[in-house]
Image (cartoon, helix red, strand yellow):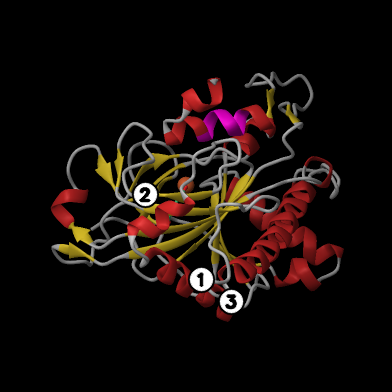
Amino acid sequence: MTETADIAVVSFERFINGNDEDKNAVAKELYEAFSTVGWVYLKDHGIPQSRVDEIFALAKTFFSLPISEKLRWKLTNPEVNQGYTADGAEANGGIDHKECYEHRRFANALCPSDSDLPTFKPVLDDFYSQCLTLGLQVLKCLAMALDLGDTFFDKITTKADPQLRLIHYPSIARKVVEQEGHARIIPHTDFGLCTLLFQDSVGGLEVDPFHTGDFKAALPVPGTVLINIADLMQRLTNDRCRSTLHRVVSPKAAGEVLPARFSVPFFIHPDPEAEIVPLVRGDERARYESVNAGEWRTWNTSRNYGLEKVVAA
Ligand SMILES: O=C(O)CCC(=O)C(=O)O
Ligand SMILES: [Fe+2]
């Protein structure tokens, strides 16, 4: 049996409502998690479970539309990175068995309208701002832990346009997913600052905390949102915070046919013009070149969708 990853459960209540001492205590706990395994289960985060349930229900409704309908909202431009991606269309060195819908803050041209799918857009917009508020609070908390002053991330997220993603992993034969090079989502790191990840109760998410190939289950914990550090944060903190490999495979408890699984990540990226320069202390050397956040995002998105040609055109 796959072991369970050692990911701390941290209550965010004392950060949201507490005094400076409370906030600093939460910041320490978060930093401890982010600088080791790179992941934390955040509870008491302020987003009601009823809202999360509503989002999963909308995701189910959206993905059960016929493929011809869903392709009306097909994602084509990695710079905008918004819309629907069919099963098999996103490939980054392996074969994923999933379909996705991406929602953005400023541009959602490829989103079902109210007459296509009642309440889809307004409820997603609202959930998006709840995730953005929580994500920026988490960044503030991390800035405290890193002694950067609690407005450090505000300066590089004023126009931040994270990506809210709905994912459906269809019900599928276990033997298909377990073929060499296949997975529900192949091992990868996320490439922004950090990710908020809501998952249903099916399981199958695994983390390789120390990049030894020893993947461990990140089981669903009701009432929590998982938060993981992504590549730009690892670069910015000169490896103090760790962006770790993860994947989604067959849940161990399932039989020969895996049940469908849904998840909802919210990827936080800095403003496109932000230069991500490693923050060094004393005579420490920078472990990374500086990168422009916008170029980094477009490059990574294009690579994931195999759309490099669109960018070059
Ligand atoms: O579905 C999940 O639990 C993980 C999704 C994920 O890692 C991603 O979309 O980057
Ligand atoms: Fe991921």
Q: Residue at x 56, y 40 (%)?
A: 242
The residue tagged 3 is 51
Q: Earlier in the sequence, mark 3 or mark 1?
A: 3
Q: Nearer the viewer, residue 191 or 42?
A: 191
Q: Is residue 150 left or right of residue 160?
A: right
Q: Residue at x 70, y 51 (%)?
A: 106
Residue 216: % across, % down? 35, 52
Q: Nearer the viewer, residue 227 or 104?
A: 104
Residue 87: % across, % down? 33, 49
Is the CB atom of the residue marked by disc 2 within 8 angstroms of ligand 1's nearest atom? Answer: no
Q: Residue 113: tell me if it is visible.
A: yes
Q: Earlier in the sequence, mark 3 or mark 2?
A: 3
Query: Taking 198 as reference, is 181 above or below it?
Result: above
Gap in angstroms between the C-alphas marked 1 and 2: 18 Å
The residue tagged 1 is 117
Q: Are marks 3 and 2 in contact (CB under 8 Å)?
A: no
Q: Is residue 58 left or right of residue 114?
A: left
Q: Earlier in the sequence, mark 1 or mark 2?
A: 2
Residue 207: % across, % down? 41, 48
Range of magenta residues: 296-301
Displayed quadrant of residue 103: bottom right
Q: Is residue 221 magenta?
A: no
Q: What is the secondary structure assignment of the residue under circle 2?
A: loop
Q: Amino acid at mark 1?
A: Leu
Q: Are marks 1 and 2 in contact (CB under 8 Å)?
A: no
The residue tagged 2 is 86
Displayed quadrant of residue 16: bottom right
Q: Residue 4: tell me if it is visible.
A: no
Is the CB atom of the residue marked by disc 1 within 8 angstroms of ligand 1's nearest atom? Answer: no
Q: What is the secondary structure assignment of the residue under circle 3?
A: helix
- Farthest-out residue, bottom: 50
Displayed quadrant of residue 95: top left
